[in-house]
Amino acid sequence: MTPADVGMPPGLRRRTPGLRREEVAQLSGVGVTWYTWLEQGRPINASAQVLDAVARTLRLDPPEREHLYHLAEVPYAPEPEALVQSVGPEIQGIIDALVPRPAVVYNSRYDILAANAVYRDLFMTPSKASFRAPANALWALFTADEEDCPLLFRETELPVMVATLRAAYGLHAGEPVWEDFIRGLSAASEQFARLWETGDVAEPGRRVKVFRHATVGELRMTSVSLSVNGMPECRIVVYTPDDEETARRAALLRRQ
């Protein structure tokens, strides 16, 4: 970076085209001595706020910012990013190749970014058409009539999903889009509102879930979450038959 990059005059007799320590300190709002000690690795107990200011001044990208935190021996917390709202054809191709296993791509708000044909057969029947853009699994489950909901044992499964949502919400608290989402779903579903108020948190993980399909009957499926490089806060969820009878029935979904 040069002084011109940050709107500063170049000055005279510069031995380097980059910023001087004094300039980095000034732009970051810290003392020159303190910043010099930071560069020298002295034990000055740098705070996350000050490190963030230095990172912004130096225009560090996320891996560089994380490296700065490690050098300063400060626990790293990534900056929240805007939720991914779409996937590329290569991701769609991957989940299509998983047929006959249902597969879907969620972001951390359970927006359905992509799904293969078997997932759509199992979950997205005409009565559960996309009433939101993008479709959202939580909205579909919490606003569906119980007899029309594909997920059985809702009393144990839905609390886990809400707890997983709340864990992700911690990175987005106060963001208008997230707050609108929580308020809207709370207004649409008293059950969601009650679960949200418990404050429970959980991480995505492997679970055995039971679904029902109007044609093939009950299906016991193990859900496995896979992270996606380059798509923060997104995961591919694949449902694998948990027993032979479910495998036989799941194979029939493709023929409906």
Image: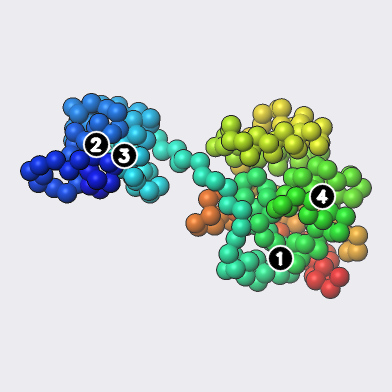
Residue mark closest to the camera, 3 vs 4:
3
Residue in view at x 72 percent, y 33 percent: 183
x and y percent of residue 36 in the render? 18, 32
Q: CA distance from mark 3 to mark 4?
A: 49 Å
Q: CA distance from mark 4 to mark 2?
A: 55 Å
Query: Which of the 4 image quarters holds residue 121?
Result: bottom right
Instruction: Looking at the picture, tell me which residue is in the foreground, 221 or 68.
Output: 68
Q: Which residue is mark 1?
A: 116
Q: CA distance from mark 1 to mark 4?
A: 18 Å
Q: Is residue 42 visible?
A: no
Q: Amino acid at mark 3?
A: Thr
State which tag comes first along the sequence, 3 or 1. Answer: 3
Q: Which quarter of the rendered picture does the C terminus lie within?
A: bottom right
Q: Label 3, secondary structure: give it.
A: helix
State which tag comes first along the sequence, 1 or 4. Answer: 1
Marks 4 and 2 in Cβ contact (< 8 Å): no
Q: Is residue 65 visible?
A: yes
Q: Which residue is mark 4?
A: 151
Q: Label 1, secondary structure: give it.
A: loop
Residue mark closest to the camera, 3 vs 1:
3
Going by the image, does 20 lie left or right of 161? left
Marks 3 and 2 in Cβ contact (< 8 Å): yes
Residue mark closest to the camera, 4 vs 2:
2
Q: Which mark is residue 223?
A: none
Q: CA distance from mark 3 to mark 1?
A: 44 Å
